[in-house]
Image (cartoon, rainbow, N blue to C red):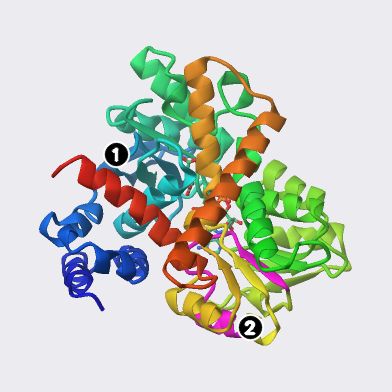
Amino acid sequence: MNSYIEKVLNEIETKNCYEKEYIQAVEEVLSTIEPVIDQHKEFENIALLERMTEPERLISFRVPYVNDEGKTIVHRGYRVQFSSLIGPYKGGLRFHPSVNQSIMKFLGFEQIFKNALTGLPIGGGKGGADFDPKGKSDNEIMRFCQSFMTELQRHIGQDVDVPAGDIGVGAREIGYLFGQYKRIRNAYEGGVLTGKGLSYGGSLARTEATGYGLIYFMREMLSANSQNLQGKTVTISGSGNVAIYACEKAQSYGAFVVAMSDSKGCIYDKNGIDLNIVKQIKEVERGRISEYVKYRPEAEYIERTSDDSPIWNIKTDIALPCATQNELTLNSAKKLVENGVLAIGEGANMPCTKDATEYFLAHNVLVAPAKAANAGGVATSAIEMSQNSMRYYMTFEEVDAKLDTIMVNIFKSCKEAAEKYDLGNNYVAGANIAAFTKLAQAMVAQGIV
Ligand code: NDP
Ligand code: 2IT
């Protein structure tokens, strides 16, 4: 390995020894950009990698709220303002009990590269709290969001840092967060949050964007390898925002989606998933995916019993991990390859473990890497910001067409970077190299900051 990369990786492992997801995300990027670093000996002297891997700012704060029983609960909130190199910090908020500093930093780091790939003027950030919205009343969610925003508001702004949704943060949470921001700041700063409701500044197609974008990227990747989605069997982990709209778009291209999941298990419907049932259970009732079999008794529910999700044991042409980090392990990768999988599309952030990704690439499975393949969500957030600045709304078709073009261009960047460095169809390395090249140029241009 290049000695500069090795030195930086060693320092990062020592300095952040408790942050395993963060180390994993950095290792994944640095191990693939070696050909670029080899050509730029000057980067070491200006500590380019050290600066790129150190967040500009990391904020951690107390979030107390009173639950419906009158008890006070304290959570920990975060915002990692990772990089403002090419635009205001931009990235989602995650509310999930697993949230910690390592997960925030890994997501913030990934976001810088993803946002660079979109070609739009957005820097990278991420935030959230170790709060579980599951089973909470609307009033509890509202009080939590208000408390979270009471602190967060002093760090964000439409030209400073623009949060959005992620796991556990959807339209309901964004509404409560926006209301509290506006109340405290006494200004209608529409572009301070994205993923807003359509009645107060949201963009058409933002809800669908990440899932649709994933399928647009998959379409491009398959087509570059003489394949297409028509008639392909697809399995999709998760049943949240990304999974649902990936399913919708895949079905519209004639793919046959047979399985979806949540953290407790998966459903296998050999006749094809009825997405209206999934939407009713998840978007309206906020229920569990297991309830699907009540509506479709011919479908099967398989409970999860280990780290290896049962969904990856199902034979499929295309697997779309759209739930969470490290949800697709080496064991699962082996099973998928044994069953003849053709392509993987990462809808979630870092869903494949490093050894799983390496196994796929070594067995000629096409991999659409998260930074590129799920960038349609944040790209459409940037389109929402520009609509807010213009005080104007685009139609669904206009936004969707822009999203499609952005995904086509992202795939092109990944492919061209892979070809330039003789990496064949390794789009994982291609995405990292394309994004890194752009960021490095901006970093050199802006001096030592
Ligand atoms: P949602 O909260 O809408 O859905 C999350 C889904 O993932 C649920 O089905 C959930 O199941 C499942 N899940 C969450 N945690 C785990 C876990 N530890 N193990 C197994 N399953 C889990 O989130 P999104 O759909 O918005 O996000 C999904 C992924 O996509 C995340 O990795 C996110 O970072 C990424 N992403 C999201 C974007 C967006 O625009 N929303 C943009 C780009 C990436 P359960 O209900 O049982 O918890
Ligand atoms: O991981 C992601 O890209 C998101 N959760 C979306 C971020 C955004 O600002 O829309």
Q: Is residue 238 visible?
A: yes
* Horizontal and vertical percent position of residue 361: 53, 78
Q: Residue at x 47, y 39 (%)?
A: 69
Label 2: state its secondary structure.
Answer: helix
Q: Residue at x 72, y 62 (%)?
A: 290
* Horizontal and vertical percent position of residue 385: 48, 27
Relative to 448, residue 221 above or below: below
Of 345 and 361, nearer the camera is 361
Q: Residue furthest left?
A: 45
Count neighbours of disc 1 (C-alpha within 10 A) and say few if under 14, some if 14 to 19, many if 20 or more. some
Q: Is residue 194 left or right of residue 181?
A: right
Q: Residue at x 20, y 39 (%)?
A: 446
* Horizontal and vertical percent position of residue 149: 37, 31
Q: Residue furthest top?
A: 186
Question: Residue under circle 2?
Answer: 337
The answer to which quarter of the image holds residue 40 is bottom left
The answer to which quarter of the image holds residue 433 is bottom left
Q: Is residue 280 left or right of residue 433?
A: right
Of 113 and 89, nearer the camera is 113
Quadrant of the snapshot with the N terminus: bottom left
Tag on residue 194?
A: none
Label 1: state its secondary structure.
Answer: loop
Question: Residue under circle 1?
Answer: 84
Q: Residue at x 54, y 22 (%)?
A: 387
Count neighbours of disc 2 (C-alpha within 10 A) and say few if under 14, some if 14 to 19, many if 20 or more. some
* Horizontal and vertical percent position of residue 399: 64, 32
Start and end of the magenta stretch?
317-335
